[in-house]
Image (cartoon, rainbow, N blue to C red):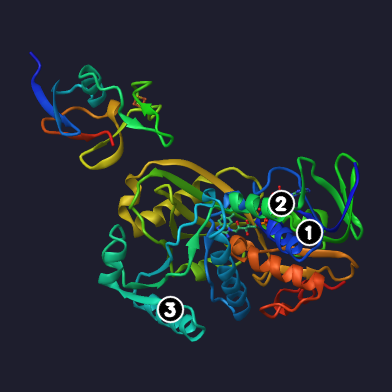
Amino acid sequence: MAERVTIFVDGRPIAAERGATVAAAMLSAGIRAFRHSVSGEPRAPLCGMGICFECRVTIGGEPHRRGCQTLCQDGLEVSTT
Amino acid sequence: MNHSADVVIAGGGIVGAACAYECARAGLSVTVIEGAIIGGGASAAGMGHIVVMDDSEAQFNLTLLSQQLWSERVAEMTDGVEHLPCGTLWVAADEEEMAEVRRKRAFYSQRGVPVEMLDSRQLAEAEPHLRPDLAGGLLVPGDSVVYPPVAARWLLDRCGARVLTGVPIATLDDNGATLEDGSRVSGGVIVNALGAKAARLMPSIPVTPRKGHLVITDRYPGFLRHQLVELGYLKSAHSAGADSIAFNVQPRRTGQVLIGSSRQFGADHKGIDQPILSRMLRRAAEYMPRIGSLIAIRAWTGFRAATPDHLPLIGPMPGASRLWLATGHEGLGVTTALATGRLIADQITGRSSPIDAAPYLPARCIHG
Ligand SMILES: Cc1cc2nc3c(=O)[nH]c(=O)nc-3n(C[C@H](O)[C@H](O)[C@H](O)COP(=O)(O)OP(=O)(O)OC[C@H]3O[C@@H](n4cnc5c(N)ncnc54)[C@H](O)[C@@H]3O)c2cc1C
Ligand code: FES
């Protein structure tokens, strides 16, 4: 069985499989707003393959990281604001 | 359809808009003819840095008057002008460039412009993402940043000039302009404010396009606090004939970082020159190593209107009776647009000007 890890999204612990993408873990946990556009619209992954940049979140304090291109590691801090 | 006005301005960039604004405020009727979009030329492609410069007394006087006019105007302008009073921080890499910091400090201080000298530690505190071994810098807090296309639109809306857009001018003469659709706009005074394209309709004026590249990043609020310019800039910017790049980065009010800059002569196509762009970005990363980890969302180019002596052409065209010039502002035309408008309106109406207009008169280099 795949190893389970915990990532923290806006402080909330989310269980995920090691090696899953951050975007997949967040979507499975029911998170639908990864960020908000300049005009305030909620945004979520579209292409899932690194092209559209809709899945951007802050990871480990670094803004504009693509959730669909970053793999889950135990203790990873993700922020949607 | 045919029109006439006291003043016909060819070109609706920031310079044409500023001329329209001052002429209309002086009581003249004004028509502006813009072939494409208001503010869509160099005025949209540039950085919008309002900066007091010290290459010569003439350049200093024009940029200082402009900076003062900008600070009066921006208070009234719409939010879309994105005014950011961030100041300029001139960055010295070594002791030789610190000597330039001291020279600049003396120059500005003697002329009443507030400045502050920073040592290596103060520079690192002011801009934490700069590499740590730099020598220091000079802060000019009165400098700022705007978004010129919106400022151009505001100046025209506010002054009530008649604005014709969409049909380019085919020819300019002493009585007016003939547009490409054959219509005619006549005027008492005709002002060529066509930026880098000014010489296309008047081939005898010494204005040549000088290409520049810029890159803008996604939003990283707080990454950068001041407009940063390396002090090697003056040397490289003025080596006429050679392509040059310099570290020149700007914070936008959106949190984006605008990265420049490059200067090329003889490049007449609008496309990105990859080798120049790479050199420019490598230079930026030498000064700010972390800049390479930011996401760039767009790169583009623009053309500055360069003159042989680096000063703009403001005033009557020698040998013509009613044609005037307001062009040749090279890399400073957003800054110097407002003083240009003032000088043009003063000369047309016979008013006195706050500064001596002689250094900018076209007659210094054009013989009619
Ligand atoms: C990369 C770059 C960075 C820059 N950074 C700065 C900076 O930080 N600070 C600063 O002060 N300046 C800067 N500049 C310079 C500044 O942008 C220009 O000097 C300024 O915008 C010139 O304004 P303008 O109105 O003369 O020209 P433009 O904005 O080019 O306006 C000329 C207008 O004339 C129109 N036109 C041309 N031909 C015709 C025709 N035949 N008929 C009708 N209309 C026509 C064009 O469509 C255009 O709108 C920069 C320039 C570049 C390229
Ligand atoms: S979902 Fe498109 S880049 Fe991540």
Ligand 1 under 8 Å from disc 2 Cβ: yes
Same chain, labels 3 and 1:
yes
Which residue is rendered at x = 54% and y = 76% of the image?
Answer: B54
**Type of the residue with mark 2:** Gly
Coordinates of residue B327 in the picture (x, y in percent)? 71, 62
Can residue B267 be seen in this snapshot?
no
Q: Is residue B222 above or below residue B336?
A: above
Coordinates of residue B346 in the picture (x, y in percent)? 75, 72
Can residue B79 be seen in this snapshot?
yes
Chain to which mark 3 belongs: B
Disc 1 element: strand
**Disc with the residue nearer the chain's start (3 vs 1):** 3
Which residue is rendered at x = 70% and y = 59% of the image?
Answer: B21
- Residue located beneath label 3 in the image: B100
**Disc with the residue nearer the chain's start (3 vs 2):** 2
Q: Is residue B172 left or right of residue A4?
A: right
Q: In this view, does B103 lie to the left or right of B50?
A: left
- Residue located beneath label 2 in the image: B12
**Disc 1: CA contacts within 10 A as few (<14), some (14-19) or many (>=20):** many
The span from disc 2 to disc 1 (Cα, nearest Å) is: 10 Å
Q: Nearer the viewer's eye, disc 3 or disc 2?
A: 2
Disc 3 element: helix
Label drawn at residue B192:
1
The span from disc 3 to disc 1 (Cα, nearest Å) is: 37 Å
Chain to which mark 1 belongs: B
Chain to which mark 2 belongs: B
Q: In which quarter of the image is residue B123?
A: bottom left
The span from disc 3 to disc 2 (Cα, nearest Å) is: 37 Å
**Type of the residue with mark 1:** Asn
**Disc 3: CA contacts within 10 A as few (<14), some (14-19) or many (>=20):** some
Q: Do the residues labelled 3 and 2 touch (CB within 8 Å)?
A: no
